[in-house]
Image (cartoon, helix red, strand yellow):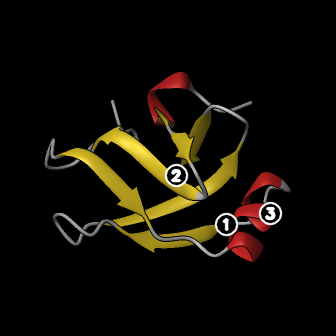
Amino acid sequence: MYEFSHSWPYEWIMDDLYVDECPFCKERSVLISLKKENIQLAKEGFKTHTVMPCCHEKLVIVNMDDDYLWSDRALR
């Protein structure tokens, strides 16, 4: 089980994945660019990497559920 401090909420708007606020620079409404294949792999528990477009910080996603991204480091 992952710690809640390593999670960050996300939402779907149309076919795009957004976080309400970047966990690193606090930019609002950030579009996360992940391919559908990578999203499926993350939901299966495989590590997926993405770069936040606002601050270029690397985010390692270790798991995803329907509401949260789970990272390998604390986001809260």
Disc assigned to residue 40:
3
- Position of residue 5 measured from the top left corner of the image (x, y, whole percent): 45, 27
- Position of residue 7 measured from the top left corner of the image (x, y, whole percent): 51, 34
Q: Residue at x 39, y 39 (%)?
A: 74
Element at label 2? loop
Q: Amino acid at mark 3?
A: Gln
Element at label 1? loop
Dot 3 or dot 1, earlier in sequence: 3
Quarter holding the C terminus is: top left
Give above or below for 23 relative to 7.
below
Question: Cβ–Cβ below 8 Å for labels 2 and 1?
Answer: yes
Dot 3 or dot 2, earlier in sequence: 3
Disc assigned to residue 18:
none
* Residue at which label 1 appears: 47
Q: Amino acid at mark 2?
A: Asp
Mark 1 packing: few (<14 Cα in 10 Å), some, or many (20+)? some
- Position of residue 54 measured from the top left corner of the image (x, y, whole percent): 18, 64
Dot 2 or dot 1, earlier in sequence: 1
* Residue at which label 2 appears: 72
- Position of residue 3 measured from the top left corner of the image (x, y, whole percent): 58, 27
Q: Residue at x 86, y 56 (%)?
A: 44
